[in-house]
Image (tube, grey):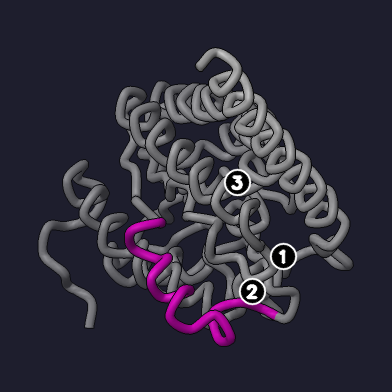
Amino acid sequence: MTGLLGAVLGAVAAVAAGTIAIIAGQARRMQRIIPVAMQPPPRAEGVIGPRFPGPPLTMTILGDSFAAGYGASKPRETLGVLLGTALARRARRPVRLHRPAFVGAMSSDLPHQVYAALSQAPDVAIIFIGGNDVTRFAPLRTAAQHLGDAVAQLRVAGCHVIVGTCPNLKVLPPLRPPLRWLAAQRSQRLAAAQTAAVEAAGGHPIPLAELLNPYFEADPVRMFGADRFHPSPEGYARAAAVSLPPLLAALRAEGVIPQTRSAR
């Protein structure tokens, strides 16, 4: 019996070691094929809706390539401009958009982005971060703590903070099992940790895996850009569409915009 148990345990260990080796190899290949940003995203900053009366709301968007709009060809296709335009219409006020987000950012880069954002005295901050923490195997608890600290710092400055939590990266077309399974698990764990950290710091989380993933799973050809890693303009439009209702609900609850929709 002891010999049989030892043989079983040895076989399990061998399978586990083999799986780990496969995942490590896939991860190395994925890092090689993840496209390097050949050019920066469109410079999507400035005043949106200048025809509206009153002082502008200052909105800052922080995070990674998703937040920065990598893959968009025009400023109006980026998440910041899409959400800022909708916010200006609902608030009936101009929105001054500032974007510290940059391609390749991880949660550990948020302190620098928050510092840049606070120099603009933002009224509203929107954060999209986490994908690079998953793919680069950053410690998830530490990543969530960086996010919670960023939210807390912005809240202390009087800024309203909305965070799109990590989507489930199993939808990335180049991923194959078993790396796809690991990416799914890490994405889910990070999103849960982000949700807890954001709520504890006084921010409002948006569950992107729940709201956005179904669209990318159903139509990856349209939702992903040519590199199959970043959203296409259609993908960014869908991301803005699912993020807008919880964003507006949070800002209405905090009195930033009127309770009743006045825009047509």
Relative to 9, say whether 248 is above or below: below
Query: Could you tell me which residue is drawn at 84 percent across and 48 percent down?
Result: 28
Q: Which amino acid type is marked by label 2?
A: Pro
**SS at mark 2 in the image:** helix
Q: Return the mark for residue 63.
A: 3
Q: Quadrant of residue 105?
A: top right
Between 32 and 181, the one lying in front of the other is 181
The label nearer to you, 3 versus 2, is: 3
Which quarter shows the C terminus? bottom left
Q: Position of residue 104 (x, y in %)?
A: 74, 48
Separation (CA) of disc 1 from disc 3? 15 Å
Q: Which residue is mark 2?
A: 75
**SS at mark 3 in the image:** strand
Relative to 255, say whether 116 is above or below: above
Marked residue nearer the N-terminal end (3 or 2): 3
Q: Return the mark for residue 210.
A: none
Q: Quadrant of residue 157?
A: top left
Between 52 and 59, the one lying in front of the other is 59
Q: Return the mark for residue 43.
A: 1
Badge 1: residue crowd in 10 Å (few <14, some 14–19, many ≥20): some
Q: Which residues are magenta?
A: 209-225
Query: Could you tell me which residue is drawn at 40 percent across and 56 percent down?
Result: 208
Q: Quadrant of residue 115?
A: top right
**What secondary structure is the magenta-colored segment mainly?**
helix
Whether residue 249 is visible = yes
Is residue 213 highlighted in magenta? yes
Marked residue nearer the N-terminal end (1 or 3): 1
Separation (CA) of disc 2 from disc 1? 6 Å
Query: Could you tell me which residue is drawn at 64 percent across and 74 percent down?
Result: 75
Between 39 and 87, the one lying in front of the other is 39
Q: Position of residue 180 (x, y in %)?
A: 59, 56
